Image: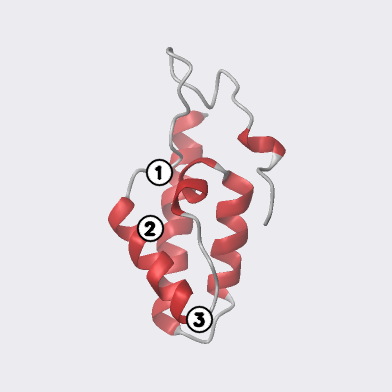
Amino acid sequence: MLAMSDAFKLTPETADTTGRPVPLIEDLKTLGRFRAKMTAQAQSVNVARMMFDRPYAFDRIALAHSSSDTSLQRLALQLFAQYSKADGAQH
């Protein structure tokens, strides 16, 4: 199993004022659909890591986008857009 990436370490940018990690995205419904579609392709997805670990999330999104399942490809693009939007909000 992959360890948490270095980017997951809490910094002032990734934590709120109480020290709790701030999710990159909060769309659990879409993340659940993503996990189900990836499971159907025999690929695992950890939703919690998708919410907080950017390198892991982008790795899973890239893997999904390379799938032959067009609905999974579209979902990967949708998630990529949500993560990109979150990146813009942080800067």
* Of marks 1 and 3, the one in the foreground: 3
Q: Which residue is mark 3?
A: 41
Three-letter amino acid code of the residue under disc 2: Leu
Residue at the (41%, 75%) spot, across then down: 37
Q: CA distance from mark 1 to mark 2?
A: 9 Å
Question: Closer to the camera, 91 or 43?
Answer: 43
User: Which quarter of the rendering shows the N terminus?
Assistant: bottom right
> Crowding near pointer 1: few (<14 within 10 Å), some, many (20+)?
some
> Crowding near pointer 2: few (<14 within 10 Å), some, many (20+)?
many
Which badge, 3 or 2, comes first in the chain's sequence?
2
Is residue 20 depicted above or below 87 in this figure? above
Residue at the (46%, 40%) spot, across then down: 24
The residue positioned farthest toward the front in the image shown: 1
Which badge, 1 or 3, comes first in the chain's sequence?
1
Could you say whether the residue bearing mark 2 is in a helix, strand or loop? helix
Residue at the (60%, 21%) spot, across then down: 11
Tag 1 near tag 2, CB within 8 Å: yes
Q: Position of residue 29 (x, y in %)?
A: 28, 57
Is residue 60 depicted above or below 90 in this figure? below
Could you say whether the residue bearing mark 1 is in a helix, strand or loop? loop
Q: Which residue is mark 2?
A: 31
Could you say whether the residue bearing mark 3 is in a helix, strand or loop? loop
Q: Position of residue 4 (x, y in %)?
A: 65, 43
Asked whether, in this view, residue 67 is left or right of residue 30, the answer is: right
Which badge, 1 or 2, comes first in the chain's sequence?
1
> Crowding near pointer 3: few (<14 within 10 Å), some, many (20+)?
some
Q: Which residue is mark 1?
A: 25
Q: CA distance from mark 3 to mark 2?
A: 15 Å
